[in-house]
Each structure stands twice: as C-alpha cells, then as structure tokens.
Image (cartoon, coloured by chain):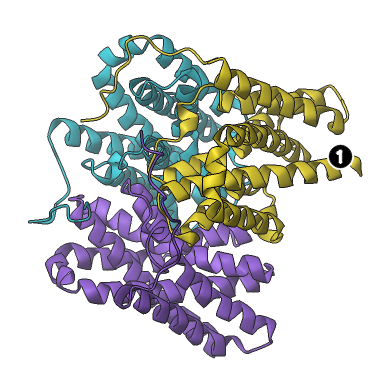
Chain colours: A cyan, B purple, C yellow
Amino acid sequence: MVTAGLIHILDIIGTVVFALSGAVVGVRRRMDLFGILVLATVTAVVGGIIRDVVIGAIPPASVKDWHNPAIAVAAGLVAFFWHPWIDKLRSPVLLFDALGLGIFAVTGAQKALEYAITPASAAVLGMITGIGGGMVRDVLTAEVPSVLREDLYAVAALAGALVVVVGNALGAPVALTLLPGVALCFFLRLMAIYRGWRMPFTRGADDRSRP
Amino acid sequence: MVTAGLIHILDIIGTVVFALSGAVVGVRRRMDLFGILVLATVTAVVGGIIRDVVIGAIPPASVKDWHNPAIAVAAGLVAFFWHPWIDKLRSPVLLFDALGLGIFAVTGAQKALEYAITPASAAVLGMITGIGGGMVRDVLTAEVPSVLREDLYAVAALAGALVVVVGNALGAPVALTLLPGVALCFFLRLMAIYRGWRMPFTRGADDRSRP
Amino acid sequence: MVTAGLIHILDIIGTVVFALSGAVVGVRRRMDLFGILVLATVTAVVGGIIRDVVIGAIPPASVKDWHNPAIAVAAGLVAFFWHPWIDKLRSPVLLFDALGLGIFAVTGAQKALEYAITPASAAVLGMITGIGGGMVRDVLTAEVPSVLREDLYAVAALAGALVVVVGNALGAPVALTLLPGVALCFFLRLMAIYRGWRMPFTRGADDRSRP
C-alpha cells in the first residue's frame, strides 16, 4: 500500500541523515569508532523508541526489527571514514537534518494516531520523535540540547506534525498530508537558517542559574 | 469520589508550580519562547510519565490526556511574560516547588499502589515522580541535578511517599494519608531551606573525578 | 534450575559492583548521603530497567522486586562509610566494574532472548543493560559518558552479549554460554585497561563543536 511504502522510504532517509549528524558530533569529540557508532545509532533511533514506548508499541520498531539500527551503523561508518568529506558538506548536512526532522515529525505523529493517541498528544509525540534523538545526542555529549536554544527547531517539527494531525481530523488521506508536513517543517528550518526567523526572547534575561 | 477529586486538584497545583520552575530556568538561560515552554512542560510531566511507563500505565496520563501538558504550557507562558515578577517571588517559588514535590511524591506513590506495585517500590516511584521532572530539567540544561546535592530534597519526597505507602499498609483511607504526606515533605523542605537541615556528608571527600 | 540460579547469583554480583562504582562517584562529587545512595541505585538498576521497559517486561524486575534496589543501597552505604578504603581498591574496583559489565551484558541478552527479541536486538539490549547504568550515572553528573570515549567498554559488553546470542542460535544450553560471555567481556576490558587495547580513532579530528 502506497502510504506504508512512502512512510518506509521516508523513515530510511530520516534514519540516515540523523545517524550522520550524530556520527559527525562523535568524530569532533574524538570518540573512538564504537563511540561514534553508538552516538549515530542513538541519534537516529531514540526519538522513535521513546515514542513507541509511550504509545505502547512494545517492543519498539527499532528493537523488533534490526533494519533501522543497521542503517544507522552503516551511516556512522561512512561518517567515520569520510568525515573530512562530510565536513565540507556542512551546509548540505544542515539541510538533510532539516529534512530528517520533518520526516520523523510527520511519521511519528502518524504512528501515534494509528495507536489511538489523542490529536494534541499525537502532534507532541511527532515533535518528540523528530527532536528526541538530537536531544539525547546532546545530553550524552554534555551539551544543552540545541533544540532548547536553536531557532524554530522544535517549532518546525511541531508544525510538520500538526499538518498530519489536522489532516487526519479533517479526514484527508494520509498520503496527502505526509509530504506537505515534511515540506512545512523543512521550509521553517530553511527560514531559520538562512533568514534568521526566530521565536521571541525575553528582554533582559541573563544567566543567573550559573554560579 | 472525594479522593479522586483531591488527587486531581493536587495534580493541577503540582503541574503549575513545576512548570513555573522549569520555565524560570529557561528564561535565565536565554532560551527562546519555545525552549522555555518545552522546559516547563518537561519539568512538569516527565516525572509522572516515567512512573506511568514503569508501572505499565501506557499511554501515560500526560499523553492520553492533554490537560496537564496544556496547564504546563500556560504556566510557561506566564513565566515568559511576567518573569521579572516571578523572579521577585523567588522565595515563594521555592515554597511552591516544595509543595509540588510533596504533591507529586504522594500522588505518585498512590498511583503505583493502585497498579499493585510492592510498597517499597511504590515509595521509590513516588519519590521519582516528585524529583524526576526536576532531574530531567537539570540534565537538559547540562547541570548536575540539584536533587543529587541539595539538602533533603529527594529525602523529603521519599518521606512524603512513605506516609501514603505506610498508611496504605495499615489500611488507612487514602484521603487521610495524602495531605499528611504532602505536609511532611513540605515541612522537611522548609527545614532544609530555612534551618539548613541536611544529610551527612563524607569527610575529606574531594572532586577527583574531574581531570 | 541451575541456569536461573546462576543468573540470579551473577545478577547480585553485578548489582553490588555497579552500585559501588556509582557511590564512589557520588562521594567524589561531595554529594550528601542520599545523593550517593541515589547515584549507586541508578547505576546498578537503570540498565536493567531500560531493557525491561523496551522488551515489555513491565513492571521491570527492579521495580516489581525490591531486592536489587536494596542491595544497591546497601552497597552505597558501604561506599559512604568506607570510601577511603574503597579508594585504595581503585584497581580492584575497575576489575569489579569489568566483571559487572560482562555479567549484565550476558544476563541482559539472555532475558531479551527469553522475550522473543530478535538476536541482533538481543545483543544490543545486552550491551545496553551493561552500559546503561554507567551512562545515566555520567549524565547525572554532567559528564560525557565514559563509555563513549573509554577504550573497548561498549565493545566488550557487546562481545559478551554476542556469545550468549550466538550460543542460543546454535542451540547451546544457556548455562554454557553465560560464563564464557562474561569471561570474554572481562578479558577485553583487562586488555583495554592493562594493555591499552583500543578502537581506531579518526585522524586529525578536533573538537569544533565547542564554541
């Protein structure tokens, strides 16, 4: 069935790009090969695992089926052996990451809906599927997750997920809401990266939480 | 039924105060609006989600039902727009936090008991429900969770949870153990904050784990 | 039955050594008694809890049954009162940690297989059972998990888990694969600690991810 096939293809693309982003961080942190592969895999699959555990899809897809972890490891190996080449592609990697964010957000929201999660929660779970892997990647490298600071990152994921959730509420066929959701998230990230679109900040905020 | 109503009211109060504490940290870290709302929501709901996943209450209450996340987001918005006003209330915020800690600890222990978790584990799960949100909030901001250092924080939560667990073992009606549990936790936090009550430390310990 | 008894004994040994490792970190960070006990318990039980949640063994063994947490707390108390004595045993502690790593990796993989997880995932879950506690311990103390940098740590756990998974695929009795798995993991850690065995690193990698 076309929708399932489309979701599967999107899932593979998202796994590859997120695994690459995790592996590149590992390379920069001078981790050994295995640390890099762990970071690549975690970045690629944790978002989906959190979603699956929370909606009751146990064991999670990435545990029941070894394809996604295998794809992530393969992508991590590529990053390990060709990282100078990947560094040159920084800008493309940012675009791929924006693409992966949108993909996981919409497929995550769609899967939540299939598990009879309420629309509001399905949208949030879609967002978490998109941002979860990156958050864990940053926590494991002792950094404040960029999603908590970066412009329009989580917002873009949420917007993409909402397209699927709203489309579902309006009875639109899934296949027709997935790509527009990905496109909206991707567009918002592009605007944040190249046009500096951002969310409002508080005035006069300073960092008093550090001693 | 009065107990359910009482638990529900306590739950809302706890969600609001924890969301405020998370949002205030986000404001101080100069996060954008969305980062602040994410941090507020995580602080308010993660403790309960961990508890629900572990006891098998899947999907967790905060996922199945959007009320708590919505309350947390609303509280986050309040903190975003009126944070200078909230900063003036630092001491009240500390008190609210102590209140929220006690509330989540007792309601968490009570829910664990309802899921036939053994008393010892129910008390620990109550404690985790109380401290979990704050721990994740600190981890996401790359800080050592204050619960691991702060005086009588986790201990106060555990004490409050134990009141519910022991009362349950003695066959006391739930409604009669909840408020005393909250009160004990709240009292212990007050003593820690204003009287410096603390747990023993090791003598001559130093930080050799940092290079 | 001999296998169950063997797994139970190994489980207790692993819990003790990991709780000690967590408690020692807490002592060095000058945490109070309770923070130390929390860190000891988390280090000892979180790996297994993650595994149990993911494979659907809910509530997790460490929640359903209070023995493991109690053992971890007891070990934490020992570390709190005798930490100078334990510091003298640094090298033995490293060996105990290597032993615990192997134990949790093989018992984790075995339990995953019992829950009909596919071999590849069972091996990974065994590895996670072994390294999970230590990763959370490091994240809670705001450090990059040593497993992501340390030589042959996760690799050793994976190798031990693979012995059980491969043995299972070949129809070997469980009791005959557990100890060899532990031994292989232990041996690899010894070689990493005393002979400097390590995984390959990328050349010319530097840390550009820090500002």
Callout 1 amino acid: Thr
Q: What residue is at 18 percent from the left and 32 percent from the top?
A: A193
Asked whether, in this view, residue C2 is left or right of residue A139, the answer is right
Asked whether, in this view, residue B100 is left or right of residue A53, the answer is left
Q: Of residues A57 and B169, which is closer to you in this image? A: B169
List x then y, in percent, for residue C37: 53, 57
List x then y, in percent, for residue A31: 42, 22
Q: What residue is at 32 percent from the left and 73 percent from the top?
A: B193
Q: Of residues B179 and C79, which is closer to you in this image? A: C79
Outermost residue to the right: C1
Disc 1: which residue: C3
Q: Is residue B188 visible?
A: yes
Q: Quadrant of the C terminus of chain C?
A: top left
Q: What residue is at 55 percent from the left and 90 percent from the top?
A: B176
Residue C1 in which image quadrant? top right
List x then y, in percent, for residue A6: 48, 30
